[in-house]
Amino acid sequence: MSTKSPTSVAEFSIDSLEKFVYQVASEIPAQEPNDTDRLGYCLWGWLQEHRGTLLQTIRAAGIRTKLSNTEILELVQKRFKEKNIPVS
């Protein structure tokens, strides 16, 4: 019996929207790295489908942080506006 090495992870290009969204999520101070990954995933999904509001998406991510959901929303909206991403 042998163990195979894990497959490599393909990184997004530096200029991609995916990289930007996950970078925005990583700027939120969270208790666990998985929290910011989950937030990034939820934000990316929201950008793709625009289901519900951005605040509902942040709540659904369930990120554990000392910031309120409203404070996270303000930070995300600010960063999205800097990149000219519509948040309405």
Image (cartoon, rainbow, N blue to C red):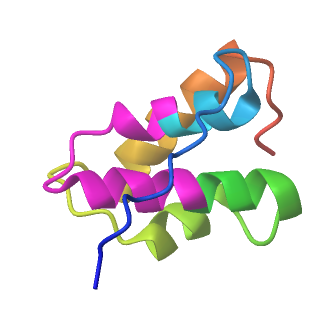
As for residue 35 lying within the magenta part, the answer is yes
Q: Decide if residue 34 is on the left or right side of residue 24.
A: left
Residues in magenta, as a range:
23-41
Which of the 4 image quarters holds residue 79?
top right
**Can residue 87 be seen from the camera position used here?**
yes
Quarter-wise, where is residue 27 in the image?
A: top left
Residue 62 vs residue 32: left or right?
right
Q: Position of residue 83 (x, y in %)?
A: 72, 17
Considering depth in this image, is 36 or 72 the residue closer to the camera? Answer: 36
Residue 5: x and y in percent read: 37, 58
- Residue 73's spot in the image, x, y percent? 49, 46
Vertical placement of residue 45 versus 82, above or below:
below
Which residue is most to the bottom?
1
Residue at the image position 57 percent from the left and 24 percent from the top: 78
Viewer-proximal residue, 47 or 19? Answer: 19
Q: Is residue 49 above or below residue 74?
A: below
**What type of secondary structure mainly makes up the magenta span?**
helix
- Residue 12 within the segment the image draws in magenta: no
Give the side of residue 59 with respect to residue 47, left or right. Answer: left
Look at the image and tell me whether residue 68 can be seen. no
Q: Residue 23 in the image: x percent, y percent?
A: 48, 30
Q: Residue at x 52, y 50 (%)?
A: 40
Query: Residue at the spot x=21%, y=49% of the render?
Result: 30
Query: Considering the image in quadrants, where does the N terminus appear?
Result: bottom left
Q: Which residue is farthest front? A: 1
Q: Is residue 38 left or right of residue 68?
A: right
Taking the spot 36% from the left edge, 43% from the top edge, the residue there is: 71
Q: How many marks?
A: 0
Location of the C terminus (image quadrant)? top right
* Closer-to-camera residue (61/69): 61
